[in-house]
């Protein structure tokens, strides 16, 4: 059912009353931030030393269920009525609010064959190149069609999903740069999604997927960084339009990164404050909505992020959430550093927090099916160690891909150096999800008369003669050989395709590993524009790779028995 706005406001008010007395103060930026009496000021820092500063007299603050200690970033006296005892069986709604070319290539086909200044590779450049009016027109059609109530109903009815992870852009809540005007209306779709989820009995984890100036340099951060055009160096022999990204990666959300020393020379507190204000706005807007499970304050801050400042940001965000949404879960990403020595003891004693780690096999070297099975099952050991050192662990992203073939997985018309490791299968690019009887998306359908088009990145990936790369099949093994994968073609010969069996086994083992000891998972992604069941939960369900219904069946519970017994 749709929840009236008035009801949500009342629920939010009741939630606020349930907490301790709250005053609203204005930050230096002019944005109102809820602040309790006795709190340390948000992001107090000494400009000369770049250290976080706290008044020792106000180090401890009483919240509804616990006492927060600012200096040590720990909690005590936890009397929370609902500890983190959830077992999440979820999917990500990726590519909707934050564009990623590999998930929805249809909306990026219009930029093939274009020159410098005419190409979009992420949400930021999409809005920059098209402008606010045309960008918003195309985005609204995308929002209308990529996630629908029917999608949510089917996920709920599968019996294998109880939660949704919703990536959102920080720019939706405090617009800046080319996002202004371009992303108008996005929050209305979030409201609808929350209502649908509640109607069908699903919870929603709101994941802030982007950060100002990019937390990792990837397109999934909203803005690709470490990008430069190199066309002037490629006049001969073909006047190619070229660029590079991966060899010069950087990320500037946290500050100025020195690529020569691989360290940050300064910290950008304004950007961090911006992110905290976004958290505050999200809490203000959705704290009364019954579908919201909680918040993830920043997706995938890269491995070079200064850990001291990242932890402090996580802590400050946690306090913002707990003031007004005391029952929300708070899930932090491991910054690609799933190490108990880093996270052990952090936020000790604090209720409702969990650590998110993303476990993919798509970037591993080619290997036998047994190797991938073993790798999947052995994740239990790592998860168990982190559960003991830190607490609840959620695998916030995973897939069934064992190769890097998905088109544009590593960026629009680009690829990581050396990838993909093996030849890929090509399938017809197909019809666009964006097109209907009254709308035709620019650039679609793909012209089958053209070879791969520019601009050209470091590596190659893109449509060729109307065909798109999607993955590789698994071929039935012959005799005792486990190295058949090295010599087999990307597309299995008729009657030798063993993909269904391999993927079904791998899915059972991953579900066993991620939920048997940890606190569950979110599959990436709920669907894909191209036919890629390795990355599409709905397609994998349809193929029978992922079981519907009870995920605590004997097939799941016993999936890793051979690996656990050392027989693989």
Image (spheres, rainbow, N blue to C red):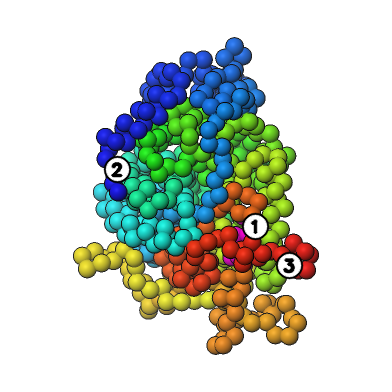
Would you call the spot at circle 3 few (<14 residues within 10 Å), some (14-19), or many (20 or more)?
few
Q: Which residue is mark 1?
A: 513
Image quadrant where residue 105 sits: bottom left
Element assignment for label 1: helix
Indicate whether 61 appears above or below 249. above
CA–CA distance between discs 2 and 1? 37 Å
Q: Which residue is mark 3?
A: 562
Q: Are marks 2 and 1 in contact (CB under 8 Å)?
A: no
Q: Residue 64: where, in percent of width, then height?
A: 50, 25
Q: Quadrant of the C terminus?
A: bottom right
Image quadrant where residue 365 sits: bottom right
Q: Residue 186: where, in percent of width, then height?
A: 33, 46
Q: Residue 182: where, in percent of width, then height?
A: 31, 46
Q: Which residue is mark 2?
A: 3
Magenta stretch contains residue 511: yes
Q: Residue at x 45, y 51 (%)?
A: 164
CA–CA distance between discs 3 and 2? 48 Å
Indicate whether 480 appears above or below 321. below
Left or right position of 91 against 441 = right
Give whichever of 262, 59 is nearer the camera.
Answer: 59
């Amino acid at each position: 059912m749709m929840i009236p706005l008035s009801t949500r406001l009342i629920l939010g008010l009741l939630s606020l009353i349930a907490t301790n007395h709250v005053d609203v103060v204005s930050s230096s930026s002019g944005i109102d931030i809820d602040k309790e009496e006795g709190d340390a000021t948000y992001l107090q820092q000494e400009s000369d030393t770049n250290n976080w500063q706290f008044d020792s007299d106000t180090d401890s603050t009483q919240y509804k269920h616990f006492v927060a200690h600012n200096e040590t970033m720990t909690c005590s006296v936890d009397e929370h009525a609902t500890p983190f005892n959830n077992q999440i069986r979820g999917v990500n709604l990726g590519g909707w609010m934050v564009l990623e070319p590999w998930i929805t290539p249809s909306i990026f086909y219009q930029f093939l064959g274009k020159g410098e200044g005419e190409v979009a590779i992420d949400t930021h450049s999409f809005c920059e190149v098209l402008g606010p009016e045309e960008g918003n027109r195309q985005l609204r059609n995308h929002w209308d069609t990529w996630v629908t109530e029917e999608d949510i109903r089917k996920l709920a009815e599968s019996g294998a999903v109880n939660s949704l992870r919703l990536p959102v852009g920080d720019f939706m809540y405090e617009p800046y740069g080319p996002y202004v005007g371009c992303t108008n209306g996005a929050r209305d779709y979030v409201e609808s999604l929350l209502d649908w989820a509640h109607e069908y009995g699903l919870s929603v984890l709101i994941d802030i997927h982007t950060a100002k100036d990019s937390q990792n340099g990837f397109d999934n951060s909203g803005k690709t960084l470490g990008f430069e055009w190199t066309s002037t160096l490629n006049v001969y022999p073909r006047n190619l339009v070229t660029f590079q990204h991966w060899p010069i990666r950087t990320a500037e959300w946290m500050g100025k990164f020195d690529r020569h020393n691989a360290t940050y020379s300064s910290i950008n507190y304004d950007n961090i404050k911006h992110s905290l204000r976004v958290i505050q706005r999200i809490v203000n807007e959705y704290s009364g909505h019954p579908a919201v499970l909680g918040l993830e304050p920043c997706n995938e801050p890269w491995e070079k992020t200064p850990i001291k400042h990242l932890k402090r940001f996580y802590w400050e965000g946690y306090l913002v959430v707990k003031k007004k949404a005391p029952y929300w879960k708070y899930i932090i990403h491991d910054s690609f550093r799933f190490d108990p020595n880093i996270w052990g003891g952090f936020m000790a004693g604090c209720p409702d927090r969990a650590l998110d780690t993303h476990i993919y096999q798509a970037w591993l070297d080619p290997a036998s099916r047994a190797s991938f099975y073993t790798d999947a099952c052995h994740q239990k050991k790592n998860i168990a160690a982190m559960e003991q050192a830190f607490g609840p662990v959620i695998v916030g992203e995973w897939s069934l891909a064992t190769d890097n073939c998905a088109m544009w997985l590593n960026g629009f018309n680009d690829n990581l150096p050396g990838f993909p490791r093996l030849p890929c299968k090509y399938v017809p690019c197909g019809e666009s999800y964006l097109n209907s009887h009254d709308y035709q998306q620019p650039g679609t359908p793909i012209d089958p008369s053209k070879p791969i088009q520019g601009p050209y990145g470091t590596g190659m990936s893109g449509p060729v003669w109307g065909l798109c790369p999607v993955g590789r099949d698994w071929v039935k093994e012959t005799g005792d050989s486990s190295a058949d994968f090295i010599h087999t073609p990307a597309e299995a010969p008729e009657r030798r395709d063993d993909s269904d069996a391999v993927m079904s086994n791998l899915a059972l083992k991953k579900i066993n590993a991620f939920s048997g000891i940890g606190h569950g998972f979110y599959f990436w992604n709920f669907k894909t524009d191209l036919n890629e069941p390795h990355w599409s939960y709905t397609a994998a369900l349809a193929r029978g790779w992922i079981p519907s219904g009870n995920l605590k069946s004997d097939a799941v519970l016993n999936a890793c028995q051979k690996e656990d017994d050392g027989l693989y």
